[in-house]
Structure formats: C-alpha cells, structure tokens
Amino acid sequence: MDLYILRHGLAGVRSAVFPGGDSQRPLTVEGVEKMRRAARGMKAMELSFDLILSSPYIRAKQTAEIVANVFGLEKKLEFSTALAADGNPKDLVEELRHRQGKRKSVVLVGHEPYLGRLISLLISGSTSLPITLKKGGLCKLSIDAVRYGRCANLEWLLTPRQMRRMK
C-alpha cells in the first residue's frame, strides 16, 4: 500500500477566539489557495487515492475536502478521531489495518507533531526521528502490511512549495 501523509494547510493563529477551541481553527484564505495549488500539483504528479482519511479538526477537514474536490473523490473522504492532534497512533494503525483490504493508496490528513512521530514510528519503529512536515507538506510511505512499529519505507517527503510547482 502507498500511504501518503499530508499536513493541513496554513491555519489561523491559535487563540481563544474560536468557539470550541483549537479543533475549530480554520484554514486562512491564503491557506485555502495554497492548498488548492498543492492539490493540483499532487494531481499533476498523477497520484491516486482509494481513501482520504482526515482528522475531524476543521483545518484538516478543509484540507482533505480541497484534495477530495481536486481529485473528484468526495465520496472517498472519511474522518477519524485517531488522526486528531491528540489522537492515538495505535488506534490509527489498527483502523488502517481494518480499512486496508484492497486499498492500494491512502492519504492521511492531520497535524504536527503527531504526523512526524507517526512517520518516524512506521519507518524506524520509534517516534524519536526528527521528522517534521511543513503545513501542506506531503510524505509517501510504501507498506506491505500495516502494523504498529517499523513496517514502512520512506519514498519521499515534499514541501508545499515543491508540490505547488508541479505542472
């Protein structure tokens, strides 16, 4: 399986202004536009997805919706609390194992530092590798069988600027 890991786009500044707390912080206008351009770059790379699985936080949900819209995959968009900023990677791995089936390509949309630690865990068996995804950054892992711990190979990691430059 190809597992793509996408960090949400540029979001509003953390503050007490958002009713419901940090989970309600949306993408900025600039964040929406940059994410659309990055998603078009992903499409230009001829990527394809069988499932888009996103954190339910507003900024991740908006990012996932932009990707789903650009790819025409609105019906393949689902949400998981295991991808929330305070999610549990063991729960996420278990969910991926159950969802893997015949899926060959899944994109996860979430938050840092959770995603960097997840990538580290899947490629090394430890969460201690210093991997950071920029806002709107994308990573590709190849996995034969999803499991908690070392099970993946890092194929590449792209900045949002690199994705926006794809044509």
Image (tube, rainbow, N blue to C red):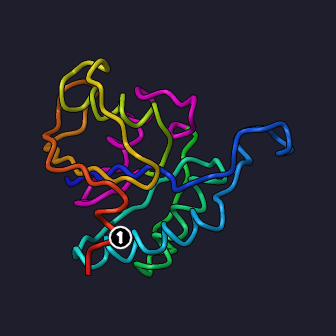
Taking depth in this image into account, of 163 and 52 the one nearest to the observer is 163
Residue closer to the observer: 121 or 29: 29
21 inside magenta stretch: no
User: Which contiguous range is marked in magenta?
Assistant: 82-108
Q: Which residue lies at the image location 24% right of the left edge and 24% below the top edge?
A: 149
Question: How many numbered discs, if any?
Answer: 1
According to the picture, the residue beneath numbered tag 1 turns out to be: 164
The x and y percentages for residue 155 are 14, 49
Q: Is residue 24 left or right of residue 11?
A: right
> At which x and y percent is residue 103?
27, 59
- The image position of residue 35, as x and y in percent, is 48, 66
Q: Is residue 47 above or below residue 116?
A: below
Screen quadrant of the C terminus = bottom left
Q: Residue at x 22, y 60 (%)?
A: 104
Answer left or right for 85 relative to 153.
right
Give the SS element for disc 1: helix
Q: Quadrant of residue 40?
A: bottom left
In the image, residue 85 lies in the stretch drawn in magenta: yes
Label 1 amino acid? Answer: Arg
Point 40% across, 71% down: residue? 39
Rendered residue at 64%/47% (across/down): 57
Spot occupied by residue 78 in the image (x, y as percentages of width and height): 52, 58
Label 1 Cα crowd, 10 Å radius (few <14 / some 14-19 / many 20+): some
